[in-house]
Image: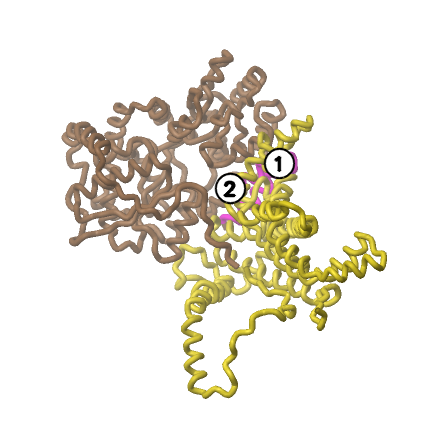
Amino acid sequence: MHPATFPTAGAPAGRDHRTPLTRRRLVRGLAAVALAVPLALGAAGCGDDSGGGDGGPVKLSVFWWGGEARAKLTEDALALYTKRHPDVTFEKTWQANQGYFDKLATLTAGGNPPDLFQIDDNYLAEYAGRSTTLDLGSYRDSGKLDVSKFPKSLLEYGVVDGKLAGVAAGENTQGLVYNKTLLTKNGLPEPTTGMSWEEHIAWAEQVAKKTKVPGTQDPSADYKALWVWLRQQGKDLYKGKELGFTAEDVTKWFELWKGARDRGATPTPDVIHEGNSSDITKQLVVTGKSATSWVWVNQMPDLKKNTKDELGVVAYPGDPSAQWARASMYWSVFKGSKHKDVAVDVINFLNNDPEAVALLGTDRGLPSNMELRAKVSETATDPAMKQSIQVESELAQKFGASPQVPIKGHSKVKSELVKAAENAQYGRATPAQAAEQFVTACTSAIA
Amino acid sequence: MAVTTAPGRTSRTGPVGPRPTRRGAGRVRLGEGLAGYVFLSPWLIGLMGVTAIPMLLSLWLSFTDYDILTPLSEVRWVGLANYERMFTADPSYWHAVRVTLTFALIAVPLKLAAALGVALLLNRAWRGVGLFRSLFYLPSLLGGSVALAIVWVNMFNRDGAFNSFLALFGVEGLPWVSDPDWALETLMVLAIWQFGAPMVIFLAGLKQVPTELYEAAAVDGAGAWRRFRAVTLPMLSPVIFFNLVLETINGFQGFTAAFVLSNGTGGPVDSTLMYTLKLYISGFTDLEMGYASAMAWVFLVAIGVVTAVFFSTGRFWVHYSDGDDS
């Protein structure tokens, strides 16, 4: 009676991607070396090249989500590690984000989780709370995991219940992406960081009137937008093991956007629903159904691939200090792994080795190592990437303190928010009813 | 796919294998028995390993707080807590039950009606009828495929093919798949459209109806409708019964299309939250596998009950012509 484990759309999982050394790779590798030599001199003592193995050949399984591009970069970086440590090879598996966590959970249940895996803040607490992830604290203390060049808040955003459950594979933050071409063509102003929510909605209304394209996606179903807004009201998504907000707060949030919908600043509910998908290709700013989308800054290059229009990105409305240096995703080690030390050494390598970091670029967000981040920023050539780096670096100066990592039950809180917000959008519930329903559902989800 | 019981009893033409004779020596029978089990073993191992043992395990898990990530050795026994929560404290569970019942109650009869109607049309000696049979059967070959569901979603989008078609007549379509009032209906249409499998079975049944009965009825002055009611339907009732049971079970188990349409969320606003989808979300997204197991077992029992009801009412309307005629 179990539904069969479902083959999700996207790249087939479980493939072993061999990476023969092609000429392109070689050239790129050489370029990376050329780039890295001066860096290595500058950052001596940063990389840990003293063998990862505890003797004997080691095969480490690595699992991540992402697209073809990320797969290639990651494989290159891991190949570089093997080059340095010929006794360590990798069993690489990757797939699309959708279905990734189902697969990871199934692998874990089957007693066969990967040694090293990518995870995000939606699930970090779930895994850490069940002791699936290794506490990396001792490696941090002994220096085997070098985090000395990490921003402090970014490192802390990997701590769950006092244990270092994951190491940021990159940093990102919320970004409001807008269609620059559309605005310029119609002689409309671009949104700016620091606009109030009211100003943002007024701006969106103006865009809608002039261009007939709804000015802004309605983000009321988007937990990250709600989160920023809550922090601006002095609240938070979570406080300890409890919700950091009340039904009244959520009512205000839903009412704000009901007002925006009534003014014609947002699309119709069915289009909003389409845009609520986590799929990059369905974001309204690239499908042309809205002038803005609410995303993460490091998604800019991916968004750009899906549209011919020029895109711009700013912080979410309101005081940008409500945003924080978020770990876009983490690397975590399975607690029962037979090769813990090697796995940690690989994380250290991916974060601190100048060549590896240069290879990986900003695909997973800005590099966590600040020194290397500066180098990567200087050498970035992709305009969309450059733009996201620039915006995030500017924002970094305004960032507030990191909130705590979302708690157990967070994934349900996210889906309940979508449900409640859509109930309000389709007019099936008043903002107050939807908010009440949401808070009730959350309370039982995190209990 | 729990029940695949044929209506049975009519299988008088079924092959009767060479039976071991009673008179055979015990030794020979033992050897044959052993060989039989050896030949059965691939299926037996599959049944035990892939179905029976996991099922029993899930029965046990339904009384625990298993969350997938915790090793099985550390799960906690929670008694009936999962069942209690399901029946008393989880409104979205009942919502899923409602969605599933609505889906099955509407889609299954319509699908069977469509299958029977087309089977009647195709049960003639027209030229090219074979081609049409294949064409109508095709959609159900694609069955629960993900690709088909994706095509369906795109067809019924606001700017999909269906709305373009409506626009030809000046009708402005709706965003069928992203409107909570229509998303489930879109899934129903998809299910109904895949009527090929029951249609083929109906066709086979229709071929079995002796033509003398129609001739006799015609001689007695029965019109087309009367012949259908008095001859076709009773003669076809075992096949109808078979299709009804099978399609009802299929209808309850609808998963793929709902999963694809809603990106695995049951949205918009839970309008496509089929029972199996709710179960999947509980188990794999919310990491409440114990709870999901409990849901699975209630589901199994519910389907069993529905099937039993069909079987118990069957004798009032299913006619087996397993007399000695012809």
Farthest-out residue, right: B221
- Name the residue carrying label 1: B176
Q: Mark 2, chain letter?
A: B
Q: Name above or below for residue B325 compared with residue A235.
A: below
Total labels drawn? 2
Asked if the magenta segment contains residue B94, the reply would be: no
Q: Range of the magenta residues?
A: A417-446
Q: Give the secondary structure at mark 1.
A: helix
Chain B pictured colour? yellow
Q: How is the image coloured?
A: by chain
Q: Could you say where residue A72 lies in the image, as x and y percent from the top left?
A: 30, 37
Q: Are marks 2 and 1 on the same chain?
A: yes
- Tell me if A418 is positioned left or right of A102 in this view: right
Task: Specify which label sits upstream in the sequence, 2 or 1.
Answer: 1
Q: Could you say where residue A119 lies in the image, as x and y percent from the top left?
A: 37, 43
Q: Mark 1, chain letter?
A: B
- Name the residue carrying label 2: B263
**Cα distance, mark 2 to mark 1?**
15 Å
Q: Callout 1 environment at 10 Å: few (<14), some (14 to 19), or many (20+)?
A: many
Residue at x 50% of width, y 22% of height: A291
Q: Name above or below for residue A250 compared with residue A291.
A: below
Residue A240 appears in the figure: no
- Tell me if A162 is positioned left or right of A353 in this view: right
Q: Could you say where residue A317 lies in the image, as x and y percent from the top left?
A: 47, 25
Residue at x 19% of width, y 47% of height: A52
State the image quarter where residue A37 is shown. Answer: top left
Q: Give the secondary structure at mark 2.
A: loop
Chain A pictured colour? brown
Comparing A86 with A55, the one in front is: A86
- Image depth: mark 2 or mark 1 in front: 1
Indicate the amino acid at tag 1. Answer: Trp
